[in-house]
Amino acid sequence: MEATLAQILAAIGEPLVDVLVAPSGLDAPVSGTAIVDPDDDPAEQPGRLVLLIGARGRDAVRPLRAAARHGAVAVAVKTDRSAEPELRDAAADAGVALLAVRPDARWDQLEQLVHGVLDGGAGGDGADDDPGDLYSLAQTIGLLTGGLVSIEDTGNRVLAYSRSDSTAPDELRRLSILGWQGPAGYLATLRGWGVFDRLRAGEEVVRIDEHAELGIRRRLAVGIHAGHRQLGTIWVQEGASPLAERAEGVLVGAARVAAGHLVRRRSRHRDAWSRDVVVGLLDGRVGADLVAGTFGLDVDAPAVVVAFAVRGGAAHELGAAELAEVVSVHAATFRRGALTAPVGARVYAVLPGVAPGAVPPALAAMCADVVAVTRRRAAVRVQAGIGSGVPALGGVPASRVDADRVLDAMASGADVAAIGDLRAEILLDQALGLLADLHDPTAAALLAHDAEQGSELARSVRAYLDALGDVRVAARRLTVHPNTLRYRLRRAAEVAGVALDDPTARLVLHLHLLRATRA
């Protein structure tokens, strides 16, 4: 697989590497890595990120130029401040990106992290990206909590971490990432405080106070569990600003999402198959029994589907994969058995245990949280449509249809809506859709006259009908004088034979004008 240089840097950048120069930009595709020793014979490296071992500082200029001549996209070098200007000039002249690697970083770690991005598609925004990638999940948790995130296995080996950006990591985080594992001394201290015992015990979020004398800032931690077995830990370090108010709730949901990723990460095929099962449930291709057996759900439990979509011209800034990560964390916080899958540009959450009837306040709050977080952190507008509750898992396709209808009918300024809020609008849309093959000569004549003469007879008649025949109300909505509206109604009768005194004709005309003039 391929990833752009920007995606690689987004996943594994500071504190391991920093980009010094990128003559061709950060969108250049990287197809793989190559470890090169300056004494090796030059070899073709098309599209590769070359890890230049055995040469530091100015000694790296010659092999850097050689790598560029043989097709390298970027060259990673361990350097020092004094040599950076010369290396920058050489990279710019050769047309290759230059990555500065921390002197205490391990080359084998860096290579495996890059391969993790290439194999998992982390950070991408295309529909084929894997929304379950651990790097993407870590970045999402960081976005939702406002902290610096690392995901570790039970041996305290770092599996993925979020970018630090402008907030400096504390000594524990820095050493853990650079060494790819928590430092023994710090781990012993945490063990002595009973942190690991509490993480093994269950889903409790453990708070660790700041200890400036040890280089440890305040952080939260939660164990990742599958049943009674611990699979790993999520750590969130507080940065320059306090953690988000709901950070602890986010961590509970994130740990449940991470558990599924860690169970499935041994087999990418299995992971993709599981997503296909969820998509199949949504569109009715996969039976509820198979889904219930796959994910350990009760096939007879009620459920509801919520659809999320990015609105406006900013859709490209937040792809379905990234939105799915945000939704999956919040949905898992709301319901342990929540299922999430992107389908096209929309993301769906199947929430078991929500019975038909009124929307639970906690569900509406969860949807509002997704909307607020994406607006605040990614500067995009997301809307959430809550479908009808169904009595069993087999009714999920019907709930999904209703969730889509809610999204399609929502006003542009609304954040969250349920089927009950918009049922009249949705039914009207369906009714108007049935008129596509029906012809009303009165409406057609009005519209044709307006198109030819530039008049507003159709709009005026519709406003009059919308106002239930109240001329003053309709005139006020049109911002015209009531006498002007009365004149237009007389002209409509002359031009198209409008019969406003016939209830049946009024109803038919109203429906056709609604279909023709509705925004």
Image (cartoon, rainbow, N blue to C red):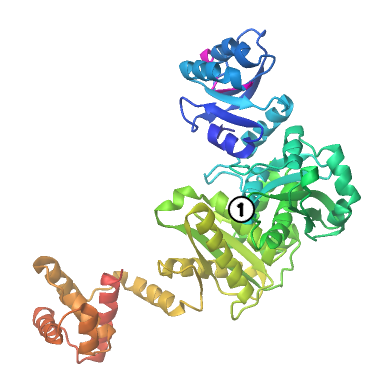
Q: Where is residue 91 shown, x and y percent of the image?
A: 51, 18
> Is 78 one of the magenta-colored residues?
yes
Numbered disc 1: secondary structure: helix
Taking the spot 84% from the left edge, 42% from the top edge, the residue there is 186
Vertical order, 241 against 180 (above or below): below
- Judging depth in this view, the residue of 11 and 405 nearest the camera is 11
> Is 71 one of the magenta-colored residues?
yes
Count of residue discs: 1
The residue beneath circle 1 is 325
- Quadrant housing the N terminus: top right
Image quadrant of residue 504? Answer: bottom left
Q: Where is residue 392 shown, x and y percent of the image?
A: 67, 72
Region in magenta? 68-80
Vertical order, 80 against 197 (above or below): above
Q: Residue furthest right?
A: 192
Taking the spot 52% from the left edge, 44% from the top edge, the residue there is 126
Whether residue 266 can be seen here: no
Vertical order, 512 against 373 (above or below): below
- Judging depth in this view, the residue of 499 and 483 nearest the camera is 483
| 387 to the left or right of 506 | right
Image quadrant of residue 288? Answer: bottom right
| 228 to the left or right of 147 | right
Which three-letter amino acid code belongs to the residue tagged 1?
Glu
Image quadrant of residue 497? Answer: bottom left
| 223 to the left or right of 462 | right
Whether residue 405 can be seen here: yes
Q: Where is residue 179 shown, x and y percent of the image?
A: 77, 33
- Quadrant housing the C terminus: bottom left
Q: Where is residue 412 shown, x and y percent of the image?
A: 40, 66
- Judging depth in this view, the residue of 206 and 37 nearest the camera is 206
Q: Residues within 10 Å of mark 1 (few under 14, many from 20)?
A: many
